[in-house]
């Protein structure tokens, strides 16, 4: 069985010394980094499945690292921070994080969040499903892959989950709250508007003309639906 690789990024050695053996005990391969540039180098070289990223890093902060990681790949990202301001939480999610945990937290809670993000980003670990064809899109849920015109499109775990929810039921209108719960989870029920950012990014990847979408359509005042005619 393939071992899942985690990258832990924190400038406090005592934090890494606690988290690393815990996740290794849960069967993960664990890499560590103490700075933003080091994290980007390790991520580029080893291609981890998920990054647990501290916000308050010296020099290059966690938000900048998150943005840079997201430009490199669709790797799962969980941000850790002592910041409790709601604006900060929304900002982290909009920069591409898949989840956000406020310090202090329990390791078991973090483990549950890790497994949740991995389920979204690695559905190949779950029961296989047939490919789904919607217009020019071919979606493989089991392998977390999508193609358009035969060319593969790379989505983040959250973007893929949103697409799967909508494409599985063309024409059905989903509120922002419903999409948020399905794609990210109940922990973010007060951050419905973050869905708009994820949808905007998703449209740029799957639509020929994001300003006039045919796949992911807006239902004003309610939410979104997948084009029924597809």
Image: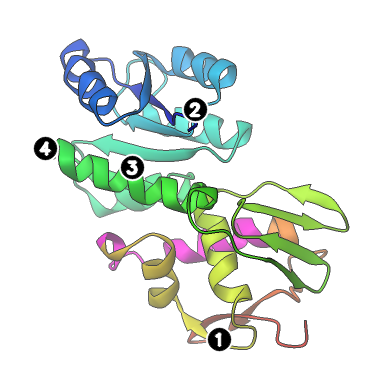
Residue 211 in the image: state x and y as whole percent. 74, 69
Q: Is residue 102 visible?
A: yes
- Based on the displayed image, in which of its 4 quarters is residue 190 positioned? bottom left
Cα separation, mark 4 vs mark 1, equals 39 Å
Q: CA distance from mark 2 to mark 4?
A: 25 Å
Per the image, the residue denoted by label 3 is: 114
| Image location of residue 57, percent across then percent down | 32, 21
User: What residue do we see at 26% from left, 31% from top?
Assistant: 26
Q: CA distance from mark 3 to mark 1?
A: 34 Å
- Look at discs 4 and 1 and give the one toward the viewer: 4
Q: Label 1 belongs to which residue?
A: 220
Q: Picture quarter containing residue 79?
A: top left
Q: Secondary structure at mark 2?
A: loop
44 vs 56, left or right, is: right
- At horizontal 53% and vertical 31% (from top left) the residue drawn is 69
Please provide the residue range marked out in magenta: 187-203
Instruction: Tell me the residue that label 4 is attached to.
Output: 104
Q: Marks 2 and 3, Cα distance to the nearest angstrom?
A: 13 Å
Mark closer to the chain start, 3 or 4: 4
Label 1 crowd (10 A; few <14 / some 14-19 / many >=20): few
Dividing the picture into quarters, in which one does residue 70 lie? top right
The residue lying at 63 percent from left, 74 percent from top is 167
Sequence-earlier tag: 2 or 4: 2
Rendered position, 141 above or below 94 = below
Q: Residues within 10 Å of mark 4 (few under 14, many from 20)?
A: few
The residue singled out by tag 2 in the image is 48
């Amino acid at each position: 069985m393939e071992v899942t690789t985690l990258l832990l990024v924190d400038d406090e050695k005592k934090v890494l010394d606690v988290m690393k053996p815990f996740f290794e005990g849960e069967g993960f391969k664990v890499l560590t980094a103490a700075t933003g540039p080091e994290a980007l180098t390790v991520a580029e070289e080893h291609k981890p499945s998920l990054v647990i990223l501290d916000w308050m890093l010296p020099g290059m902060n966690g938000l900048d690292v998150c943005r840079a990681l997201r430009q490199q790949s669709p790797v799962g990202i969980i941000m850790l921070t002592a910041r409790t301001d709601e604006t900060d939480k929304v900002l982290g999610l909009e920069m591409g994080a898949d989840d956000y945990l406020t310090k202090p937290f329990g390791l078991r809670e973090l483990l549950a969040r890790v497994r949740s993000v991995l389920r979204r980003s690695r559905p190949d670990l779950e029961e296989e499903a047939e490919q789904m064809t919607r217009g020019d899109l071919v979606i493989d849920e089991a392998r977390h892959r999508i193609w358009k015109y035969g060319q593969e499109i790379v989505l983040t775990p959250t973007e893929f989950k949103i697409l799967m929810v909508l494409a599985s039921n063309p024409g059905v209108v989903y509120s922002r709250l419903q999409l948020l719960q399905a794609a990210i989870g109940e922990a973010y029920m007060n951050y419905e508007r973050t869905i708009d950012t994820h949808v905007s990014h998703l449209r740029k990847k799957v639509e020929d003309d994001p300003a006039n979408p045919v796949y992911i359509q807006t239902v004003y005042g309610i939410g979104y639906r997948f084009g029924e005619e597809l």
